[in-house]
Amino acid sequence: MINLNNYSIVLLSAGVGQRLGPLGGKKPKCLLKINNQTLIELLINNLKKRKAKKISIVVGYKSQMLINFLKKIKKIKINFIKIKDYRKNGHSYSWFLYKNYWLKEKKPMILFHTDIHFDPIFLDNMLISKKPDIIGVKYKKYHTLKKRRYFVEVNNENIIKKINSIDKINKPQQEVIGINKFSVKTTKNIFDFMGKFFNKNNKFLQWETLIDHYIKKTNDSIFILKKQNYSHVNINTIDDYYKAKTLKFN
């Protein structure tokens, strides 16, 4: 049975929704509503259904608005981590700020973006899988691919060789979706790598780029699950938001 209480769960929610125009300037993206519920509510409800008792969330842009909203959510403990200079730092550095909290638990980690709307089967398949380290991806046909998204290149064993943009990936079909699972060993190794990697010039990087550097440096085996072609939208633009509002899950 799936039990997220056995995992350390961190949500990245510090960024500014610049590509959403005026809508992104009013509130954090995760407070956008889908069928009268915010994205963050939908995500947390899915976590609670899977027995999560505690989560951490890294906040930055309009952080107090988000904190006030989340304090109303019941039956789950929420730990807030504030990031300073969130406009200058990417979500790889937001993730790094969770290190000291993770060290108190040292459980396998689940890492989420909070600006996504997705079929929970993505998460369930990762949790059921015996692979200890998984970057969540969705299969996409080439003509549906979008720029400014991250894709993975894998070998015959579905081990990731590279994470990058469309033009730098061989046969880009597996799009990164912002849901990931890491073992205790790999989580520790990634945090140790971050401690040596970050400097004042690269804290702005996305976590996908950081993991790409990590894989090349360590050759650790991080997998994808193939044939994951369920409903999912990463909400960056108004069009993404409208699409998200049309999705229906079983």
Image (cartoon, rainbow, N blue to C red):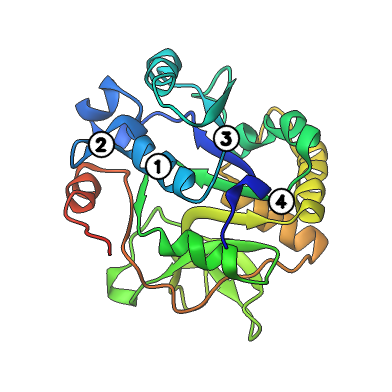
N-term mark: 4 or 1: 1
Q: Which mark is residue 108?
A: 4
The residue that disc 3 covers is 55
- Identify the secondary structure beneath mark 3: strand
Instruction: Kindly indicate the quadrant of the structure image that contains residue 126.
Output: bottom right
Q: Are marks 2 and 3 in contact (CB under 8 Å)?
A: no
User: How far is disc 4 from disc 2 in space, using C-alphas?
Assistant: 29 Å
Estimate the x, y position of residue 134 in percent, counting from the top left. Answer: 62, 63
Location of the C terminus by quadrant is bottom left
Around disc 2, counting alpha carbons within 10 Å, would you say few (fewer than 14), some (14 to 19), or many (20 or more)?
few
- Identify the secondary structure beneath mark 2: strand
Above or below residue 200? Residue 152 is: below
| Relative depth, front residue between 92 and 247 | 247
Instruction: Kindly indicate the quadrant of the structure image that contains residue 153.
Output: bottom right
- Identify the secondary structure beneath mark 4: loop
Q: Nearer the viewer, mark 1 or mark 2?
A: 1
Left or right of residue 154: residue 45: left
The three-letter code of the residue at mark 1 reads Asn
N-term mark: 4 or 3: 3
Estimate the x, y position of residue 70 in percent, counting from the top left. Answer: 42, 23
Q: Are marks 1 and 2 in contact (CB under 8 Å)?
A: yes
